[in-house]
Amino acid sequence: MPSFTPPEQLKREIGARAQALACVNLMVGTGIFVLPALVAEGLGATAILAYIACGLLVFLLALCFAELGSKTTISGGPYTYIEKAFGPYAGFLAGNLYLLGAVASDAALANALPDLLQQFIPVLRIDVYRIIFQLIVFGSLAWLNTGSVKGGIRFAVVAGVGKLVPLLLLVVIAIPHVQTANLKWVTEPTVGNIGSASLLLFFAFLGLETSLCNGGEIKNPARTVPLGIFGGVSIVLILYISIQLVTQGTLGDGLSAQKEAPLAAVASIALGETGKLLLIAVASLSILGSLNGEILSMPRILFAAARDGLMPKTLAKVHPRFATPHIAILVYAGIGFLLAVSGGFKQLAIVASVSLLLIYLGVAFATIRLRKIERNASRTKTFRVPGGSLIPLMTAAGIIWLLSNSSKPEVISICVFTGGLTVLYLAMLLFKKHQYNKKRGKLKTA
């Protein structure tokens, strides 16, 4: 990919192990603690097919992201890939859609946290205390990530390990309680119900690319990105399928009735009340870890867009002492907080899935487009997806299939949002043109 962007003055602190654990931390959020029951509601034991469908698509996406990320040495992640491939307008749409999906995902997570804790902290049932709690969460994570990228990465690593180990232990401990009869397929799945279940389930897989937004802070991207993203995705896929199998095998037909905390129900059977409390603690850490990972990475989209002149320049400021995009971090956390106090988990989860699937579609096509662009540029040794355009096209086909399961209100909402962004972009162009002509007129009269 040709590079014509000035240095960002950010520190390269992220290696392959941190990248992989950050990927795990970002993907394993609230979704896996809730969605097994919601997916099983329509599919029963055949819910595993939705995991396989999502897993195949995620693996194809990982190939595309590994190729693009290994070639990119600047911040911005998917926004940067799409902007370089298709120009400023596509970049503007991608950046804002990506931010919408990410901030909706964060808000969904932030809504789930007080729901989990309110049985221990009853005042969280009261709106004003719930809002104060969410303000503390977003404020603390913004402060941590403003101080240094190392601080955010360290917490991401701790949270990644802290949620991964107990979940793996749950799988092992629950195996003796699995009944093979609960895993038998008694209903015949259809393409339609697998598709609708997969669209909801995909929320649990969001985040595989988020750590790539820190492209300007990754050590040796050509090596680190492929190792990190494939390592993280492989761990998550194995973990998710194992969790669904032991959850279905343990709870059977009762799984769909445990919509609030299916994994806590499994832990309660395997370990009693102590197991339930442990799972709630792990889920809380998981949410905080995912929110931290988002606040660590997603503000780089604002930073990159401001760097490219598509957003206010103040968002591209780098802290003189901490070398972090502090303004972008504070703005992103503020938006996340406002959205969190105004919406619920399920609605925000669907908005996040649809928005980010559109971005993933753009990334699949950007993989093909940027190969053509780089033919005329100097090449360095980077990761390249085998099979020519086959993998990106298969990825695009899978995404379109998932999006086809969206409801009419969701499609209308995204169309209205995109239309509004288009009007805003045209207004920005007219304003810039007016400012340019005004400045040119002053020079002529001088």
Image (cartoon, rainbow, N blue to C red):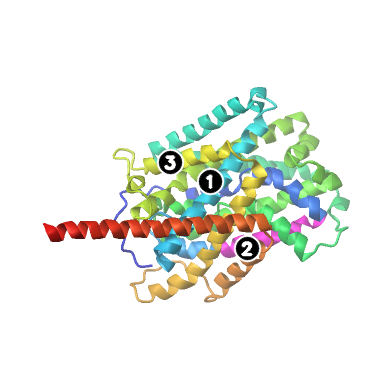
Residue of label 2: 57
Identify the element where label 2 is drawn: helix
Q: Which residues are magenta?
A: 45-61
16, 82: nearer the viewer: 82
Q: Residue at x 62, y 70 (%)?
A: 397
Label at residue 331: 3
First reached walking from the N terminus: tag 3 or tag 1: 1
383, 308: nearer the viewer: 308
Amino acid carrying mark 2 in the image: Leu
**Circle 3 crowding by C-alpha within 10 Å: few under 14, some 14–19, many from 20:** some
Residue of label 1: 103
Which of the 4 quarters of the picture holds residue 184?
Answer: bottom right
Q: On screen, 182 above or below 88?
A: above
Looking at the figure, which quarter contains the N terminus?
bottom left
First reached walking from the N terminus: tag 3 or tag 2: 2
- Residue 100, position as x, y percentages in the image: 53, 50
Comparing labels 3 and 2, the label whose residue is closer to the camera: 3
212, 356: nearer the viewer: 356
Q: CA distance from mark 3 to mark 1?
A: 11 Å
Q: Residue at x 39, y 57 (%)?
A: 427
- Residue 218, position as x, y percentages in the image: 41, 52
- Residue 377, position as x, y percentages in the image: 34, 73
